Image: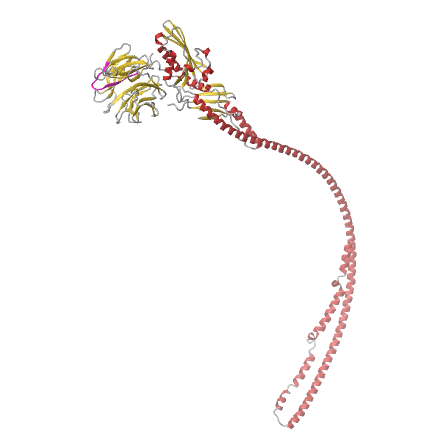
Amino acid sequence: MTNRTRTPGKTSRIRYACQLVCAFFVCAVLGSGPASAELTIRITEGADAAIPVAVVPFAESGGIPSSDKVSSIVQDDLTMSGEFNTLAPEKMLSLPSQRSEMYFRDWRLLGQRYVLVGQLSRSGDRVEARYELFDVNREERILGSSASASANNMRTLAHHISDKVYEAITGVPGAFSTKLAYVTLDRASGEPRYRLQVSDVDGKRARVRLEGKEPILSPAWSPDGEKLAYVSFETGRPAVFIHELASGNRTRIAEFRGLNSAPAWSDDGRSLLLTLSKDGNAEIYRMDIASKNLKRLTNHWSIDTEASWDHTGNGFFFTSDRSGGPQIYHKSSENADPRRITFGSRYNARPRPDNEGKYVYYVHQRDRAFHIARTNLKSGEETVLTRTESDESPSVAPNGRMLIYATKQSGNSVLTVISADGGAAYSLPASEGDVREPAWSPILH
Amino acid sequence: MTGQDRDVTRTGQQPWKSPVALSLLLHGLIVVVALTGWSWSTPRDEPQPQSIAARLITQQQPEPSPVVEEREQPDRDEERRRDQEEQQRREAAERRAAEEEKAREDARRIEQEKERKQQEAEAVRKREEQKAREEEAARQRAEAEAKERERQRAEEEKRRQEEARQAEEERRKQEEERRKREEAEKREREEQARREAEQKRKEAERRLREQQLEALAEEADRAQQAEARRRQEAAAAKAREARMMSESEKYQALIRERLSQAWYPPSSATEDMTARLQITLLPTGELQAVKLVSSSGNTAFDNSALGAVKSLSRYPIPDDRDTFERYFRQFTIEFNPRRLQ
């Protein structure tokens, strides 16, 4: 931990020479004097806690909509990430909105590391936010910017600010302006209503994109965030659709005999990985979307399914029970031999790699419970990330720092966001009924 | 001179060397020889008287036989006659014996006379010889004495000469000695002067050397003391160092702990990122300055490190000012997340 470096500098050389001379006269070898050394303390562990951040309610001028308070949204965003511990406004000693009003000592006393202040001003239909982020200990402004949005779009403005703050502190782009796609099941009216919905990452502003009494599964975002692919049983049989969100146009691209499931977009958005059983048992194919041409990528008597491209775009992870139970495998290219990734338990399924090639996340069974786990692809080390027990469908945020999955909460299925290393969990407010099959969108532009 | 005189006198008195004594001794010797050994030495010179006696003994030889026969004759006349005869014979024998005895006595007297005469002659001869010898001896003595005197004179002369020579020699020797003595004395004086000078010089040298030695000794002493002091100081410094070290380690651990708690590595942090910060503290433990000496390459990471360092209002530092100055006045903190998942 501590490293003591002795620097044989000029002084010590001179001293050495002096000693030699002395030795000549006194005929005594002198012991070496204390060499100059500068202490080095190495810090290898950080606080096992979220970063304390204070989001001061923004000063407002003009008619600012009171419903969606920007600072509150930002505060929730930062909290949801699991990386920040935000200070409740009622505990603040002052409510500055600009640098001149900042008393760093106060914030330091409150144990805060960062303070976000801002001002909202309305001009016509638009609201402008001028905001500044201060590093309390360094007493420096590390962010100062302004952004504007239409008055009815304060959430977008807030998520944008969250992204900027997140990036300023962590060095990683925020993913708060992204979207979630998921499927809800509502049994309230007697017959099941399946709804494909798209919302903000905090679950707000959810909009139903598809609704039916037949199950909807496996929504998958196109790389540009404009389309969703999913499996729908609306025809009575599983079929894969591509759904253009802006227009609502839908295309049924795969309705082969047997199983049609688990679509996954390629990086260029031109092809999909699909699981089809048209040739006997479940195998993975790549379909060129434009031509609908198929290429079979796996060939095994066991089930191969739930494919997902890796970060290179050349290889893919998938679930196969070729070794008996479901395990995660990886093919580094379409023609490479599959390599088994998971060994920790008898059930590991639904792999979702991050976009950096570091980890693969999946559903992991241990002691009859289903958790979300991840494996470090370099070291092979497996870490269980969740403490909930019926976890399924993990999906990784595009910045790789957050993870959303479905789990059971008092009988209902809910969505939970955790930080990618298993930090604090943030459950999305439950809408009606079960919420399943979450899919985190790419970063939207 | 006197020694030589004495020597000469003593030589003249030597008894065995004197001729008178020698003659006396010779006479004595002759008398003794004459008294003891004359009887057995003379017969060879005088054989005749002995042969006369021997003839007489042979005439009486047949007598023993009638003695034996007589015993066997019982006849008294015979015996008487034999007794007469015997008597006669005996008387004859006695006469003969007396005659013989008388003859022998005469012979002996003659012999003795002869011997006496002989002795007398001999004595005369001897006396004459003695006299001649004595004369000769006297002559010789006189000669010898003359010679002796001559010799003594010569010797005396010689001695005188010798003495003169010796005296001269002595004088010369004395002169020489005196000269030598004077020379020696002179030399001695010179030597003395030289020795004194040498002594002085040596003394000066010795004093100088002593001074030098003293100086050297003092120097050595000083050096030794300095060395001892230095050793002592080094040992003390070492002990202090050790104390400071352990003290320092304690506070390093405290600082590490505080900083670990204060550091929020950003989510972009990776294990290969290292930010090095140079810290300068005030003796109160407050942060005086912090300098980013080596960036991790990630601004958020650097800022997190800076933030952590600046977040401590007061650093835990040792009370000992030396330890503080030595280790905590200025030191480096390295932020390097090694336990990232």
Left or right of A23 in this view: B261:
left
Query: Residue at 77% across / 50% down in the picture?
Result: B166
Left or right of A87 in this view: B60:
right
Q: Is residue A151 visible?
A: yes
View extreme (top): residue: A124
Give the image location of residue B83, x and y in percent: 66, 92
In depth, the one of B85 and A370 nearer the eye is: A370
B45 to B167, vertically: above or below: below
In depth, the one of B61 and A7 nearer the eye is: A7
Q: Quadrant of residue B211?
A: top right
Q: Quadrant of residue A189?
A: top left
What quarter of the picture does the C terminus of chain B occupy?
top left
Query: Residue at 78% across / 65% down in the picture?
Result: B138
Q: Quadrant of residue B175?
A: top right
Check the image and tell me how it is coloured: secondary structure
Total residue callouts: 0
Residue B194 sits inside the magenta stretch:
no
Give the image location of residue A291, x and y in percent: 24, 14
Q: Is residue A312 visible?
A: no
Give the image location of residue B149, x and y in percent: 79, 59
In depth, the one of A44 and A280 nearer the eye is: A44
What residue range appears in magenta? A252-267
Residue A266 sits inside the magenta stretch:
yes
Give the image location of residue B84, x and y in percent: 67, 92
